[in-house]
Image (cartoon, rainbow, N blue to C red):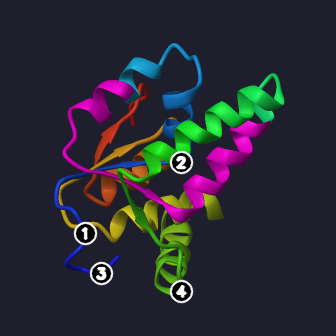
Amino acid sequence: MTDLDRPSGSLMLDTSALLRRYLADSQRPLVLDAMAGATAWAASSLARTELQLALHLAAPSASAQAKLWALVRDDWEAFWEVPVDGRCLARAGEIGARYGVGVTDAIHLAAADRLPSPVSFVTFERQQIPAAADLGFKVISPFTI
């Protein structure tokens, strides 16, 4: 993704949010509504891998897993995938040190930080919320800071 390719006003979803798109959960409507109201969806490259592995573990059968993975593949075409490259990892190190979040959380936040403002950040990971808010993202979560 080049600077010219990056959407403005993006909805960034971390893995915890993406899971709720595909699995039954009481908070699923929050994610679906946020996605329905967004003009551009974004996620890190890491999120896709995490999502597929989590869906593999959650699927009750191989055929259910295949259906879930097919949904992800179809949806992924609509996402702006933010690469987890050296630049993203360097920023993740800064974010992790500054906010005391773990590597995975820091990578999702660093990927979101590469998008032009405004960015809405959807997460169900409580530890990401203060960092996301401080980074200037509009946080969409059932939890408050």
Residue type, numbered disc 4: Gly
Q: Which of marks 1 and 2 is in front?
A: 2
- Alpha-carbon neighbours of circle 3 within 10 Å: few (<14), some, or many (≥20)? few
Q: Quadrant of the C terminus?
A: top left
Q: Where is residue 15 in the image (x, y as percent from the top left)?
A: 55, 45
Q: Quadrant of the N terminus?
A: bottom left
Residue holding disc 4: 86
Residue at coordinates 31% horizontally, 35% vertically from top-left? 35
Q: Nearer the viewer, mark 2 or mark 3?
A: 2
Q: Of residues 134 and 92, which is closer to you in this image?
A: 92
Image-based side of 7 in relation to 2, left or right: left
Disc number at residue 6?
A: 1
Residue holding disc 3: 2
Disc number at residue 126?
A: none
The main secondary structure of the magenta stretch is: helix
Contact flag, marks 2 and 4 (Cβ < 8 Å): no
Question: What's the distance in space between the residues labelled 2 and 4, CA to CA?
Answer: 25 Å
Residue holding disc 2: 73
Tell me the SS state at disc 2: helix
Residue 102 visible here: no
